Image (tube, rainbow, N blue to C red):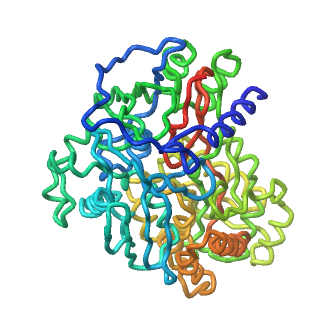
Amino acid sequence: MKKRLLALAMCMAMAFTTVGCGGGADSTTAAGSEAGSEAVSEAGSEAAPSGSSTVVVAMGAGFSTLDPGYVYEKNPPVIINACYENLFKFYSNEGAPEPCLADTYEFSEDGLTLTVTMKDGLVFASGNPMTSADVAFSINRCKNLKGNPSFICDTIDSIETPDDKTVVFHLTQPDSAILSKLTYSALAVLDSAVVKENGGTDAEDASTTDTAQNYLDTASAGSGMYVMTSYIPDQEVVLEKNTNYWGEATNVDKYIIKIQPDSNTQMMTLSAGDIDVAMNMTDDTMSELAEADNVALINAATKTVGFVMMNMNEEYGGPVSNPKVQQAIRKALDYSGIQMICGEGTITPYDIIQSGFMGSKGERPVDYTNVEEAKALLAEAGYPDGFDIDLTVTDLDMEGILLTDLAQKVKDDLSQIGINANIVAQPWAAGYGDAYRDGTLGFTVMYWGTDYNDPNVQLEFLPGAVVGMRAGWTEEMAPELAALYEKTLEATDNEARTAVLEEIQDAMYEDGPFIMIAQAPAHIGYNNRLEGVAISDPYALDLTLINIK
């Protein structure tokens, strides 16, 4: 345990001190070397020996493309973040986005215009200088490709580039999450000249005319610390140092990223020294490495959150639509026990804004559970002897944690106050998914993964919003709370937005149809010859922060 805590503390500290995207806001920048030079060498798949400047990473499968304009799955950001850069970036797992390619930025008084001035000396791996036109091309291309991530651009009405260093975003509405959205992998800045040469376009008909995906699936066209030199689908990706990198780089010259989803295989190859980082570890495989001399372990919560949903529409929710019953269920749940089921690193968020997000109020107190209070609340609601109810659950997992296991724990906890929850298992594809989205599920356990790394994604749990309506929670049921949605969007000042987010959490702490029961953990093991390894919600693993000791 002491070893794991020490490793976690070391990694968190390193995340603030190592470099990435030109070394961050405080680093000095260096103009790229002569145009045309490239970092290309023959890809190798051998293990990196101790002392080598090559680092071998094992991660899971499950992605279909490495074209930034299309990426939407969990693992591609590991590669995109290493090969491309954005106007803004998250340099740690907490707090607000910081300038990366951007130098300064300013919002208009009405919040409808964002003006970004770019840094000097920015250059792509090709040697081409980066200009504001490349930024506009990249973002317009993502928007017009109409792929899975294009929604991230929904509030961007148009982009102006009055000069080579200035980008002006005209928004359809105030959007306090716009800086966070601009950190998203799909909005990475591409070398427009290279992409156009290979069939790319940012035209409105890009969804049918752009043919650059084939090229971008096998080569990178960015300004990042690394370039992609090889990609064998479902096997391996090789990244090598970008010799034209404009900023300050780490001392890792090459990454070999192995597609190796099995956690036991990762555990054995890490133990043997054949890989340096194992990203798909579990509680069990982590325990196998607890005494390994050359391995450090990290257990920490992600921003993926599991929740109980109780439909406010009595037609579907029955007794759980009663606010007093909802309060009783909150008090009855054993949050510490749920954390044990989910594994080391799990926490229980205070409410809908996960711990680690701007404005989060942290964790729900460990002593919140009170069975006697829960029984009293149930009696006030008119159910002194409890009731029977179906608890529907589907065949999905939350970061490897089966929702059926969480449902069983909820059932056991509620039995302590007289509620008999009958678990009804329903495959996602056989009706659960449609019922969940249509708002016809009465009582369920589900999970939510963030689309982009900003607390505003959680506003969908408010009454009248997308997830709120899945619980039958209309705007008319809580108009003052519903109004905080727009108020949050309009708060482009971080302090003002934090105040609104805290107000939302306090309002939902004891009331409403959602109970956040766990922030799921992630587990990473790594060779202790490395420093700066850390769990990252935006990027899964930020390769630009890792150094070899």
Q: Which is more toward the observer, 398 or 178?
A: 178
Q: Is residue 179 left or right of residue 26?
A: left
**Picture layout, residue 92 above or below residue 496:** above
Which residue is rendered at x = 48% and y = 44% of the image?
A: 29
Q: What is the quadrant of the N terminus in the image?
A: top right
Q: Which is more toward the observer, 381 or 16?
A: 16
Q: What is the quadrant of the C terminus in the image?
A: top right
Residue 253 on image: x %, y %: 44, 25
Which residue is rendered at x = 24% and y = 35% of the image?
A: 36
Residue 127 on image: x %, y %: 29, 40
Which residue is rendered at x = 18% and y = 57% of the image?
A: 201
**Picture layout, residue 268 above or below residue 375:** above
Q: Is residue 234 left or right of residue 351?
A: left
Q: Quadrant of residue 228?
A: top left
Counting every numbered tag in the picture gives 0
Observer able to see residue 104: yes
**Picture layout, residue 535 above or below residue 378:** above
**Picture layout, residue 409 above or below residue 18:** below
Q: Is residue 492 left or right of residue 439?
A: right
Q: Which is more toward the observer, 397 or 169?
A: 169
